[in-house]
Image (spheres, grey):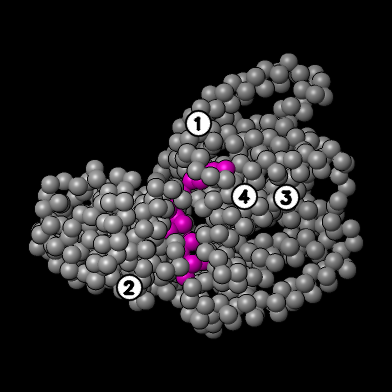
Amino acid sequence: MMSAWTLSVHVCVLFGWNLKNLLLLVPFVVSLFFIGFFHCLKKSPNSFETEAISYERAVVGLLLLAWIFLAYAVTRSDLDDAYFTAVAAFSSSHPESSLLAVDPMFGEKKLPLPFPSCRFSSFELISGAIAYLFSVPAMDPYYIYLLPVWLMVVLAATFLLTKEIIPQRWILAGVIAFLFTLLLGEMHRGPANFSFVRIFQGKAVFLSAIVPLIFYFTAKFLSKRGTLMDLFLLGCCQMTSIGLSHFGTLMAPIAGFGALFSNVPLIISNWKKACLAFAMLLIPAPYLIYIMLQSKNSPLLNFPLESSTQVWSSVMGIHQQYLIGLLLIIGPILAKNSLMRWRLAIPIFLFFFIYLNPYLSEFISKYVTTPAVYWRISWSFPILIFSAISYALVIDNILEKKPLRHFYVSLWFFIFGLILYSLPYNTLREKNIGPFEGFAVWKVPSNTLGIAMEIITIIGDNGTSLLAPDEIAGVVSRFEKHPRLVNVRGMYLDILKPSFSSEEYSRRIALYNLTLGTISEEERFIEESLKQLNVSIVIIAVDNESSEIVHLLHTAHYKRIKVKSNYAFWVNKTSSLRDAVKQINVTNNE
């Protein structure tokens, strides 16, 4: 279904069609995919393995319920959603506008999308379509309705891969993978945060579900049990990856390459199947060529380079890197057979000796991934699942009472010691997930959400602009109707710099710095910028309200009308918001 949706979106983008056209096209494309699916099914007897005893089903079911409950209880904001949710909100509120044609955040019709790859992002449009069909805010399906769906897919992908690699302990490995998701969340970039805290994002679904499925379908197709259905679904995974994440277009073939060559014994015995599996890696090729041609002189190329050691520690964590590193190393050593050893060793070898090779890292960063997202090379294989399989192998060797049982017991205790060392930096710590603010609610802190909703009540979309810090502007952009925004995130101003005139860019940067408590230009220039960009409301943190900034805002005819959640509201006294301001003052007096 996701691959059919992705292809439908791309057809609409190609012809400049809108959301209404997409909803008419999708049933037709889905029908074609189902025809292909059932055709493959006829030629693939026993494609789906359903043998699972009752306790295994019970474990998987209970794990899913626990995962959904925890995911709904976490309310952590992510400023990446300033764009992702804006896509859903813009498409649902502008159903007659061409899909993925203009920037959805700033409220400026002239601005292009931040990246060329954004034209292929179909994931967020699912929430937009649901919001349009049921007349609900786009944040409802994005944060609430679809969350269990993505968790079910992630759980299925995890257990399918563990069953393929370690069939004798697949339930154990899957449960450990879930526990590692709750444990190994030291870093924002870490795979555990993507698998759980950020699972509502397309890139999280790609990393946590599609990458394991690519490894699973590749391994199964190359095996004696492999059928045409597995090849078809492998191709669907590659297609889906393009729509899930800007980076998925590149990482899906890279992950597929690792998955393919981790099955060397099977490739040798059936090279024709290997060629077919390799052909699936070429599905994203036309998209990659387009992105490469459109990304010349991209601001992303000017980001500072990260070394391979910086990438490793920034993804795995200063404290948790030892546990993950040890588990990845011992997995191939403890493998039960040659095929399992190949499957565990090759992706790890490629990761450490090619992708994180200090002699190759600069080349890969500059010419393959771009410096800004070189760290995402860690998406080349499912690290959490491989780590879980390694730990399951240690436990398996203990339970089987092998001759070296004392060694395995000692190894288990050593790993458990590293787990205890990692425990204070777990995924569920408050610093990582934020305070509990409600069950099954929008993943936005209540203080910034309240400010954003009040701003929209005051201004709406009357044509004037809002100047606010990232944490406020990045929430305002997620609503269907909102004022024009001077900035959304500071980095987006740099990314969209080629789309602004030099004067407008300078004005926006000067005003953005003002929200940070810095006067970076002459006061006269900032006053003119406020006027030129038609800023009717300025939101600034009270801690950043220096005497110089207060004087500047008074001089520019702004009045401080209230403070909410430690943010001050400054309204232009010459704007057309007098009635709204009076209403606020009445409310405050009450």
Q: Which residue is mark 2?
A: 462
Compare marks 4 and 3 and give the one earlier in the sequence.
Answer: 3
For the residue pair 501 and 450, the one nearer the viewer reads as 450
Q: Residue furthest top?
A: 406
Residue 28 position within the rendered picture, expressed as x and y whole percent measured from the top left: 71, 79
Q: Earlier in the sequence, mark 2 or mark 4?
A: 4
Q: Nearer the viewer, mark 3 or mark 2?
A: 2
Q: Which residues are magenta?
A: 73-90
Question: Residue shown at 59%/36% (left/top)?
Answer: 182
Q: Which residue is mark 1?
A: 425
The percent position of residue 546, horizontal first and vertical second, equals: 16, 46
Disc 4 versus disc 3: distance between alpha carbons? 10 Å
Label 3 belongs to which residue? 156
Q: Residues within 10 Å of mark 2 (few under 14, many from 20)?
A: some
Q: Mark 1 is on which residue type?
A: Tyr
Q: Where, by quadrant of the figure, is residue 280 drawn? A: bottom right
Task: Give the label, 1 or 4, closer to the camera.
Answer: 1
Q: Name the magenta segment's main secondary structure.
A: helix
Q: Nearer the viewer, mark 1 or mark 2?
A: 2
Residue at the limit of the structure toward the front, as seen here: 590
Q: Which residue is mark 4?
A: 208
Tag 4's secondary structure? helix
Distance of label 1 from label 4 (alpha carbons): 20 Å
- Whichever of labels 3 and 2 marks the residue nearer the N terminus, that label is 3
